[in-house]
Image: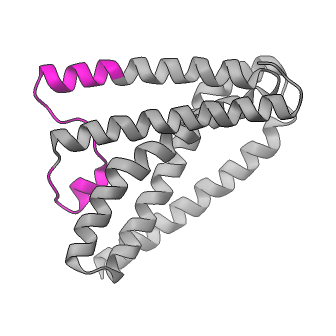
Amino acid sequence: MESIIFYGVALIILFVLLYLFSIINYKVENMNHNTRYFLTLPYSIFVSILFGFGIRITVMILSFFWSEDDTILNVYTISYTLMPFMTSYALVNASSFMMPNHKLITAIIMSVLVILLNVYLYYLSFSKNILIFGDSLLDFFDFKRGSIGEIVYLISFLAGIGFGIKHSKSEASFIGLEG
């Protein structure tokens, strides 16, 4: 009963966040450039968190229908591949969405900032021997984190950034902008 209430509340929160997302997307088109510069980072983080939260809630609900073996495989796969790919892709795309006249350069700058942050976190992870990466889904299902998973997480994260930059580049060239 408690888990049903938890999932119900989580779904309500997700729908409220999606509603806020739609309002923000509508308002962005009417903002001046100075406001967009200021809001690029917070908006990108918000979209990335929204994507991650949506995937987590979906996995938690779908786990009711999976066998134990399927749950283990699916949670590890999603935590180490899909989550970092989608959240980094969303972060890069959201940043380029905020700056329609500078899509590519904004996506590259955001990517460099996020990669530098992750390099620092990897340094902390390996120097302090603490496993930082992996998703909270692993904690929710009481699964252990591992070093190989962290490497897979990094590769998926970088792939998401690469696809985000590629998407921003193709959008910029499609509408006739050069960065």
**Residue 139 falls in image quadrant:** bottom left
Residue at position x 31%, y 18% in the image: 120
Query: Is 151 displayed left or right of 47 in the figure?
Result: left
Specify the quadrant that holds the C terminus. Answer: top right
* Residue 131 visible in the shown view: yes
Color theme of the render: one colour
**Boundaries of the magenta span:** 119-144
Query: Is 27 displayed left or right of 3 in the figure?
Result: right
- Residue 126 drawn above or below residue 65: above
Check if residue 22 falls in the magenta segment: no
Specify the quadrant that holds the N terminus. Answer: bottom left
Instruction: List x then y, in percent, for residue 59.
Output: 39, 66
Query: Is 78 displayed left or right of 160 in the figure?
Result: left
Residue at position x 81%, y 45% in the image: 26
Q: State the residue in front, 139 or 75.
A: 75
Instruction: List x then y, in percent, for residue 4.
Output: 36, 78
Residue at position x 65%, y 26% in the image: 40
Q: State the residue in front, 84 or 5.
A: 84
Q: State the residue in front, 144 or 50.
A: 144
Instruction: List x then y, in percent, for residue 92.
Output: 59, 32
Check if residue 138 falls in the magenta segment: yes
**Residue 93 falls in image quadrant:** top right
- Residue 74 drawn above or below residue 161: below
* Residue 94 visible in the shown view: no
Residue found at the very far left of the displayed protein: 129
Instruction: List x then y, in percent, for residue 19.
Output: 68, 57
Residue at position x 13%, y 19% in the image: 127
